[in-house]
Image: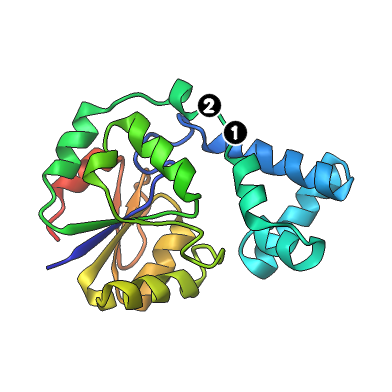
C-alpha cells in the first residue's frame, strides 16, 4: 500500500492564503536583527545560504551560531489561527485516503500542529515528520527523504509526495516516488499536476 507524504504550507490551503508569506517576512526580520544588516543584504545572504545549504537556517547555524529552535520559534510566531479556518472539504478528502499518511514539512512541529489544527485536520494527521526530525536539513535536499524512508521502513516506489514546490517534487520523482504537484497545471515529465489539494482525491495511487 502506498504511503502519502503531505506537505502543509501552500499545499493544504491555497497558495498565498495562509501564514507562509508572514513566515518569510519573519525570516528577513530575524536575519536583519541577528546579523545587523539591511534588507538588501539580508535577501542576498538568504539567497546564498539557500543555494549552499538548502535553507537560510542552515547558513545561520553554520556561520552565525544560531540556535535552530530559537530561530524556528521566532520565525513561526505568526497569527496562524487568524488566517486559517476549519476546512470541511479538506477534512473529507483526507478522511477518504486509505493509505498511511505522514506530514512531511520544512516547518517546525509546533507551527505545523497549529496549521493543521486551524484547518481542522490535526486529528487525522498524527505522524509529523518536520524540520526537527530532518536534523534541520530541509526539502528538497535528499537527506530528509532518505531519513523518512528509513524511519518508516518503506521504499520510494511505495511513497507519494504531495507538495506545492516543484524542487521538492523533482527530488521525490528522481528518487522513484510518485509525485503530485499541487497548485499548478505545469507539464513536467513524471509528475502529476493538480490545481488544488481537493483534486488529489481524483488521482489513483
Q: Where does residue 104 sit, x and y in percent of width and height?
A: 38, 57
Residue 141 percent across, percent down from the top left? 52, 70
Which of the two residues, 201 or 144, is positioned nearer the viewer here?
144
Label 2: which secondary element: loop
Farthest top residue in view: 82
Left or right side of 99 for 130: right
**Front-most of residues 155 and 48:** 155
Relative to 63, is 77 above or below? above
Query: Measured along the vertical axis of the image, is residue 18 above or below residue 53?
Result: above
Mark 2 sits on what residue?
A: 79
> Disc 2 to disc 1, how far (Cα)?
9 Å
Q: Residue at x 39, y 34 (%)?
A: 14
Where is residue 49 drawn, in percent x and y?
72, 62
Q: Is residue 176 above or below residue 196?
A: below
**On the rendered image, what quadrant is the C terminus found in?**
bottom left
Name the residue carrying label 1: 22
Local secondary structure at mark 1 = helix
**Which residue is painted at 31% across and 41% down in the image?**
195
Identify the residue at horizontal 13%, vertical 50% (top origin).
97
Residue at image position (42%, 36%) is 114
Q: Position of residue 12 (x, y in %)?
A: 34, 40
- Picture colour scheme: rainbow
Contact check, label 2 and label 1, Cβ < 8 Å:
yes
Amino acid at each position: 500500500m502506498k504511503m502519502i507524504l503531505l506537505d502543509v504550507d501552500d499545499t493544504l490551503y491555497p497558495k498565498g492564503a495562509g501564514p507562509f508569506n508572514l513566515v518569510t517576512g519573519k525570516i528577513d526580520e530575524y536575519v536583519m536583527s541577528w546579523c545587523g544588516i539591511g534588507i538588501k543584504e539580508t535577501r542576498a545572504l538568504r539567497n546564498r545560504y539557500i543555494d549552499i545549504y538548502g535553507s537560510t537556517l542552515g547558513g545561520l547555524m553554520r556561520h552565525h551560531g544560531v540556535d535552530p529552535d530559537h530561530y524556528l520559534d521566532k520565525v513561526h510566531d505568526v497569527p496562524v489561527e487568524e488566517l486559517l479556518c476549519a476546512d470541511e472539504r479538506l477534512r473529507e478528502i483526507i478522511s477518504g485516503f486509505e493509505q498511511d499518511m505522514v506530514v512531511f514539512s520544512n516547518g517546525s512541529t509546533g507551527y505545523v500542529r497549529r496549521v493543521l489544527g486551524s484547518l481542522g485536520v490535526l486529528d487525522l494527521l498524527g505522524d509529523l515528520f518536520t524540520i526537527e526530525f530532518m536534523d534541520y536539513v530541509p526539502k528538497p535536499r535528499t537527506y530528509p527523504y532518505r531519513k523518512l524512508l528509513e524511519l518508516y521502513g518503506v521504499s520510494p516506489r511505495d511513497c507519494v509526495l504531495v507538495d506545492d514546490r516543484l524542487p521538492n517534487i523533482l527530488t521525490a520523482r528522481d528518487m522513484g516516488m510518485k509525485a503530485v504537484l499541487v497548485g499548478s497545471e505545469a507539464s513536467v515529465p513524471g509528475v502529476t499536476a493538480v490545481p488544488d489539494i481537493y483534486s488529489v482525491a481524483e488521482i489513483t495511487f
